[in-house]
Amino acid sequence: MVAISIMIEGQNGLNWPYWKRLVSEVEDLGFAGMFRSDHFTNARPPDKDSLEMIVSLTYLADHTQRIHFGPLVAPLSVRNPSLLARQAAALDDLSNGRMILGL
C-alpha cells in the first residue's frame, strides 16, 4: 500500500483557525502524515500570517491520533540543535512515536 502525506507552507497565510481545521481534515481524509516547512516569515511582501513550527506541531500531536508529522526540514542554522532534539523527543513522546524530524 502506498502512504501519502501532505506538506504545508507554514509562513504563507497559516493562522490558527485554518491550522485547526486543516489538522482535523488531513487525518479524516486518511493521509499518512502531515509535514510543514520551518520558515519564520514569508520572503516576499505582503507579510502573511505565520505559525511557529514547534508550537503548531504540538497542537497537531495533541489533536490527532494516527498521522505522522514533523518539519519537512528544520534548519540547524537558525535552531539550536540541542533544544530542537529535546523538543522533537518531547513531541515524539506526546504523540506516541509519530514525530519525524527532518533536518
Image (cartoon, rainbow, N blue to C red):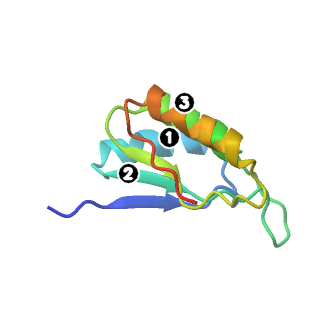
Look at the image and tell me in which quarter the C terminus lies: bottom right
Q: Amino acid at mark 3?
A: Ala
Residue at x 46% of width, y 35% of height: 92
Q: Position of residue 58 (x, y in %)?
A: 57, 33
Location of the N terminus (image quadrant): bottom left
Residue located beneath label 1 in the image = 21
Residue 59 is situated, as x and y percent measured from the top left of the image, at 56, 32
Q: In this figure, which residue is indicated by the disc labeled 3?
A: 90
Circle 2 sits on which residue? 33
The residue at 72%/59% (across/down) is 39
Residue 93 against residue 25 in the figure, above or below: above
* Disc 2 residue crowd, few under 14, some 14–19, many 20+, Cα 10 Å: many
Q: Residues within 10 Å of mark 3 (few under 14, many from 20)?
A: some
**Secondary structure beneath label 3:** helix
| In the image, farthest residue toward the bottom | 44
Closer to the camera in the image, 94 or 57: 94
Q: If you read the primary sequence from the N terminus, does the residue marked by circle 2 or circle 1 appear first? A: 1
Task: Decide which of tag 1 and tag 3 comes sooner along the chain.
Answer: 1
Determine whether 20 is above or below 2 in the image: above
Q: Residue, x 49% and y 54% (percent of image)?
A: 35
User: Mark 1: which secondary structure?
Assistant: helix
User: Cα distance, mark 3 to mark 2?
Assistant: 18 Å
Q: Is residue 88 left or right of residue 5?
A: right
Badge 1 amino acid = Arg
Q: CA distance from mark 2 to mark 1?
A: 15 Å
**Residue nearest the viewer, comparing 48 with 95:** 95
Point 31% across, 42% down: residue: 28
Total marks placed:
3
Q: Can see residue 69?
A: yes
